[in-house]
Image (spheres, rainbow, N blue to C red):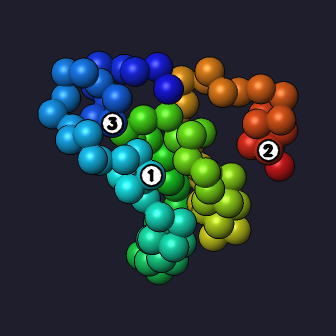
């Protein structure tokens, strides 16, 4: 959401095709749930959610956080903070 130079989705410096959509590049909710299940089975205790772009732009981020929390993970979310309004902050606490 800030057109960061290192973001493969938005940077004019990256060689991302115009046909690549951010939605297609995001991890699917179903794959995230599967990974949480598999990581829990491997005795993983923490998740750090960081990647290409702002995680709060993912349309299922709060569902994903809920799945990770229910699996018992300690969760770290790396965000640029620009989307942290009152509602999103409350959703993160919840």
Question: Residue 53, relative to residue 59: is it above or below?
Answer: above
The residue that appears at 62% across and 21% down in the rendered structure is 82
Q: Which residue is mark 3?
A: 9
**Few, some or many C-alpha atoms within 10 Å of disc 3 (few <14, some 14-19, many ≥20)?**
many
Count residues near mark 1 (Cα–Cα under 10 Å), then give few for <14, some for 14-19, many for 20+: few
Q: Residue at x 78, y 34 (%)?
A: 89
Identify the mark at residue 23; answer none if there is no mark. Answer: 1
Question: Could you tell me which secondary element the residue under label 1 belongs to?
Answer: helix
Q: Residue 18, located in which quarter of the rendered image?
A: top left
Circle on res. 5: none
- Chain-order first, disc 2 or disc 3: 3
Q: Name the mark on residue 91.
A: 2
Side of 39 relative to 80 (left or right): left
**Where residue 16 sits in the image (x, y, percent)?**
21, 38
Q: CA distance from mark 1 to mark 3?
A: 10 Å
Q: Nearer the viewer, mark 2 or mark 3?
A: 3
Query: CB of mark 1 within 8 Å of CB of mark 2?
Result: no
């Amino acid at each position: 959401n800030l057109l960061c130079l290192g973001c493969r989705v938005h940077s004019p410096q990256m060689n991302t095709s115009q046909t690549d959509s951010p939605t297609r590049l995001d991890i699917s909710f179903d794959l995230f749930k599967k990974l949480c299940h598999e990581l829990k089975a491997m005795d993983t205790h923490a998740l750090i959610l960081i990647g290409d772009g702002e995680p709060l732009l993912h349309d299922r981020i709060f569902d994903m956080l809920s799945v990770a929390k229910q699996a018992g993970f300690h969760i770290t979310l790396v965000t640029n903070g620009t989307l942290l309004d009152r509602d999103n902050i409350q959703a993160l606490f919840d």
